[in-house]
Amino acid sequence: MTEDDDKVKKIQQWMLDKQDLYRERQQDLKELTEEEYQKIMIFFANFIQALGEQLKVRQQVIATATIYFKRFYARNSLKCIDPWLMAPTCIFLASKVEEFGVISNSRLITTCQNVVKNKFAYAYPQEYPYRIQNVLECEFYLLEMMDCCLILYHAYRPLTKYCADLNSDTELLPLAWRIANDSLRTDVPLLYPPYLIALACLHMACVIKQKDIKQWCAELSVDTDKILEITRQILALYDMWKTYDEKKEIAAVLAKMPKPKLNPSRPPSEGSNGQDGSNQSVQGQGQNLQQSNMQSSGP
């Protein structure tokens, strides 16, 4: 098997369809509307972005962490593992996979505490409850679910290549790059390969910049219907943002979110025998995950 064949196989392994996503979300959609579910995914993508920026990691690390997060919940209910724990776990794992370097344990948790307190208190007013041992245990569940398929291919590389081919590195690339970042707030990375996402982002940038690339596109052997569908999903995100005030609305949405059966109820200093009071609850969340997997694999 060639390197390109292996790359295609890895990409296809995690290409889902809308029916797959809808089926897996049924448990959560008993308590949430589809729009509320999307707002939760957008919120935690923003949380991961803020964590990554505070930790000064590359955008590729943030993108990888965001897709890890989306892949986990594409196969599991929100109540299996608390997203407030899964988000930093994804950053922690992505920093190693993308060879950014291991983020120190204390720095990761301190950054989570500061980001939640300073930027997301409107959504989570209490103290951030998790500690590094919780992240390490959560990482195990994430690795198990991902089947150790950790190498991701993003839209950034083909996007850079396409813009260079069009001699539009300075004109189109910055705008198309931002659109690619925004696509991480949609289901697009779960449904389409990176090169199609890149083409859709480039197409949108060209429309905004009023640049005609019809002749260039005509030479490509691609499914234009899929490009248009990706474009529609990103535009739907922009339409929602026009009327959506996250700071005012997300607290009520998060209150409806399915929760793990056990949550940390006290800081680690108050745990029995000086142990972290949140440790048992992560184990309980893992049990939620195992029970969910057993139910989904049953006859």
Image (tube, rainbow, N blue to C red):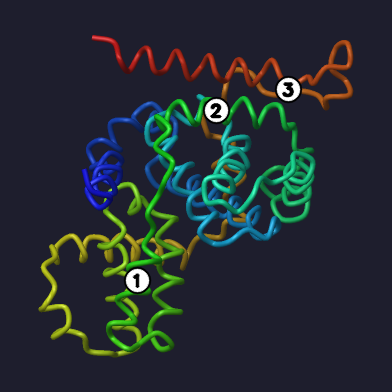
**Label 1 sits on residue:** 159
Q: CA distance from mark 3 to mark 2?
A: 13 Å
Q: CA distance from mark 1 to mark 3?
A: 43 Å
Res 137 quadrant in image? top right
Where is residue 30? Give x, y as percent.
39, 28
- Looking at the image, is mark 1 or mark 3 nearer the viewer? 1
User: Where does the N terminus fall, quadrant-wise?
Assistant: top left
Q: Residue 278: give its label.
A: 3
**Above or below 38: residue 133:** above
Where is residue 131? Give x, y as percent.
74, 31
- The residue lying toward the viewer, choosing from 171 and 182, is 171
- Whether residues under marks 3 and 2 lie with C-beta atoms below 8 angstroms apart, the answer is no
Label 2: which secondary element: loop
- Whether residues under marks 1 and 3 lie with C-beta atoms below 8 angstroms apart, the answer is no
Would you call the spot at circle 1 few (<14 residues within 10 Å), some (14-19), or many (20 or more)? many
Count of marks overlaid on the render: 3
Does 20 sit left or right of 114 as displayed? left
**Above or below 168: residue 177:** above
Q: Residue at x 52, y 25 (%)?
A: 141
Label 1: which secondary element: helix
Q: Residue 81: give its label.
A: 2
Q: Residue at x 14, y 66 (%)?
A: 224
Q: Earlier in the sequence, mark 2 or mark 1?
A: 2
- Whether residues under marks 2 and 1 lie with C-beta atoms below 8 angstroms apart, the answer is no
Q: Earlier in the sequence, mark 1 or mark 3?
A: 1
> Which amino acid lies under the numbered mark 2 shown in the image of this protein?
Ile
Label 3: which secondary element: loop
Would you call the spot at circle 2 few (<14 residues within 10 Å), some (14-19), or many (20 or more)? many
